[in-house]
Image: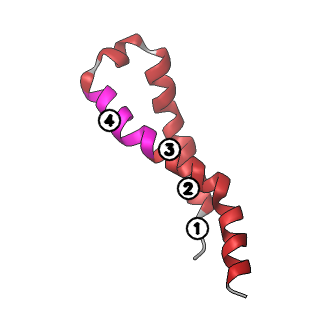
């Protein structure tokens, strides 16, 4: 299975302003809805996307080597 790296990378980059806003904006940090969306939605998806981008090529090589 080929991962859509370009899509994952673009979503990862689009999510970064939300993390930046959480870190640097006290007003947004005080907003409970924004805080919940970032903590339980944006951050886990961004972390998973980062791991896929980082480990994806290694896992693909390992999977290709095991199928031979």
Q: Which residues are magenta?
A: 33-44
Name the residue tied to disc 1: 3
What whole-number distance in Å separates the C-alpha atoms at marks 4 and 3?
A: 12 Å
32 part of magenta stretch: no
Up-down relation of residue 12 to residue 24 (above or below): below
SS at badge 2: helix
Determine which residue is flagged by label 2: 8
Write down the residue under mark 4. 37
Decide: is 20 above or below 49.
above
Tell me which residue sits at (45%, 47%) in the image: 45
10 Å crowding of disc 2: few (<14), some (14-19), many (20+): some
The answer to the question of whether label 3 and label 1 lie on touching residues, with beta carbons closer than 8 A, is no
Q: CB of mark 1 within 8 Å of CB of mark 2?
A: yes
Quadrant housing the N terminus: bottom right
From the top left corner, tell me how far across and down residue 41 is, in percent. 36, 42
Q: Residues within 10 Å of mark 4 (few under 14, many from 20)?
A: few
At horizontal 55% and vertical 46% (from top left) the residue drawn is 12
Residue at mark 4 to residue at mark 2: CA–CA distance: 19 Å
Residue at 74%, 79% (x, y): give it: 65
Residue 33 is situated, as x and y percent measured from the top left of the image, at: 25, 28
């Amino acid at each position: 299975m080929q991962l859509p790296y370009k899509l994952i990378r673009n979503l990862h980059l689009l999510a970064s302003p939300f993390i930046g806003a959480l870190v640097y904006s006290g007003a947004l940090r005080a907003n409970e809805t924004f805080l919940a969306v970032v903590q339980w939605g944006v951050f886990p998806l961004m972390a998973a996307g980062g791991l896929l981008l980082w480990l994806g090529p290694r896992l693909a090589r390992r999977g290709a080597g095991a199928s031979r």
